[in-house]
Amino acid sequence: MFTSPKIAPSILSADFMNMERDIRVIEQGGASFVHVDVMDGHFVPNLTLGVPFVKQLKRITDLPLDVHLMISNPLYQLPWFLECKPDIVTVHAEALDESAGEFDRAIDMIHEAGSKACIALKPDMDVDVLKPYIGKLDMVLAMSVYPGFSGQKYIEGTEDKVARVVEMARAAGVSPLIEVDGGLGANDPTRAVAASGCDVFVAGSAVFGAEDRAAAIAAMTKVAQEAQA
């Protein structure tokens, strides 16, 4: 919450035939994380990356891997991904059964493996679901698009959700990172969520679709810094 802006380029928009090259470019361009979108074709209508790919990414970069699991059975698959030693692992609240204690189980599994734990919320998910767990989370991800495909338009009002997460965290005496994913660039949505308390800004096409990716990262960072100030 109001830490220095961190840009997390989403490799879903990178060139998969030249992934290592693209990773090197964002390393040199000032990225803070590599955002890895894992989609299973069930939880979201798209199929992307799996465990072997994440394992290879870990070998080619020292940037922290921010692994976003958009999958319908996270408790079953989490051990597979945790073996890759990702730095941050995100599971979706919508894929967890609160009445069965699955929020606590997922967070504990991630922490026991030595990774940081994040819970993601789709745009229509109430942030209040996080209240019992906010003290255990290292990061909260507010989706500003419906997950599944890159290049979508930012959903207005996400900045209000970020502000509510900030309020909840402060009331609990904790300060998890707050991440926003969808429709961000050197634009008004980035400015809005930064002013509300976002620390980590996921950008796919805004970075990898730019001719100068370092300049795109720098421009996003500048917009976020100015909004925070």
Image (spheres, rainbow, N blue to C red):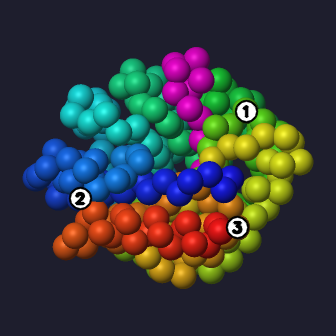
Q: Quadrant of residue 46?
A: bottom left
Q: Distance from label 2 to label 3 (Cα)?
A: 29 Å
**Residue type at tag 2:** Ala
Residue 134 appears in view? yes
The segment highlighted magenta reads 109-120
**Residue type at tag 1:** Lys
User: Which sits earlier in the primary sequence, circle 2 or circle 3?
Assistant: 2
Question: Which mark is drawn over residue 160?
Answer: none
> Callout 2: few (<14), some (14-19), or many (20+) C-alpha neighbours within 10 Å?
some
Whether the residues at callouts 2 and 1 have beta carbons within 8 Å, the answer is no
Viewer-side residue, 81 vs 29: 29
Residue wearing tag 3: 196
Q: Which element carries disc 2, helix, strand or loop?
A: loop
User: Which sits earlier in the primary sequence, circle 3 or circle 1?
Assistant: 1
Viewer-side residue, 60 vs 107: 60
Q: Which element carries disc 3, helix, strand or loop?
A: helix
Q: Is residue 17 left or right of residue 11?
A: left
Q: Distance from label 3 to label 1 (Cα)?
A: 22 Å
**Residue type at tag 3:** Ser
Q: Is residue 82 left or right of residue 15?
A: right
Residue wearing tag 2: 14
Residue wearing tag 1: 136
